[in-house]
Image (cartoon, rainbow, N blue to C red):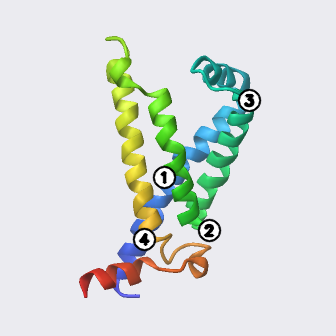
Amino acid sequence: MTQVQDRQAAGLLIGRSLLGLIFLISGIGKIGRFAAVAGYMASKGLPMSELLLTGTIALEVLGGLSLILGWKARFAAGAFILFLIPTTLIFHPYWSADAASYSNQLNHFLKNLAIMGGMFYVALLGPGKLSLGREDESRTESDTLQSKSA
């Protein structure tokens, strides 16, 4: 690998690991606060909140690990994008927030948009050379970057 490829590989590893860490920590945290989180979800009008929470925990823990390890990272990134769309709209509606919570809800809304942006990068570029699933990916980040420069 050239020095540029080394930096790209390291950057993709760091980026996807940081994205994965957000969800891994969140998912593990929900396990210990299961009843409270399920109650909060129900208060937002979600039916079967315990079942939805179980799925959320599974996605956050397994998907977070998938991103960190780089195994099936594109699939995990796509799943997180689809997960974040309704999650962001349901749990962070800054447009209907009162004055006391407006800034907090706007910040969380924008944070989720930024995370989705990062997930699009993972979905497009793949996990990078420093990953467990590189051979499973149909298109590598260097192939994508090289075709853009050609």
> What residue is at 61 percent from the left and 78 percent from the top?
136
- Residue 7 placed where, x, y %? 36, 74
In the rendered view, does 40 fall on the left or right side of 147? right
- Location of mark 1 (residue): 19
> What residue is at 74 percent from the left and 29 percent from the top?
50
Under mark 1, the amino acid is: Leu
**In what element is the residue under mark 3?**
helix
Checking the image for residue 71, the label placed there is: 2
CB atoms of marks 3 and 2 within 8 Å? no
**In what element is the residue under mark 4?**
helix
Among numbered discs 3 and 2, the one appearing first in the sequence: 3
- Location of mark 3 (residue): 50
Q: Nearer the viewer, mark 1 or mark 4?
A: 4
Q: Which of marks 3 and 2 is in front?
A: 3
**Which sits in the foreground, 86 or 146?**
86
- Residue 27 placed where, x, y %? 64, 40
**Which sits in the foreground, 31 or 99?**
99
Image quadrant occupied by the C terminus: bottom left
CB atoms of marks 1 and 3 within 8 Å? no
- Location of mark 4 (residue): 125
Q: How crowded is the residue under tag 4: few (<14 C-alpha within 10 Å), some, or many (20+)?
A: many
Disc 4 to disc 2, C-alpha distance: 13 Å
Q: Image height check: is 88 above or below 64? A: above
Among numbered discs 1 and 4, the one appearing first in the sequence: 1
- Residue 146 placed where, x, y %? 32, 84
**In what element is the residue under mark 2?**
loop
In the rendered view, does 49 fall on the left or right side of 102? right
- Residue 97 placed where, x, y %? 37, 16
> What residue is at 62 percent from the left and 73 percent from the top?
132
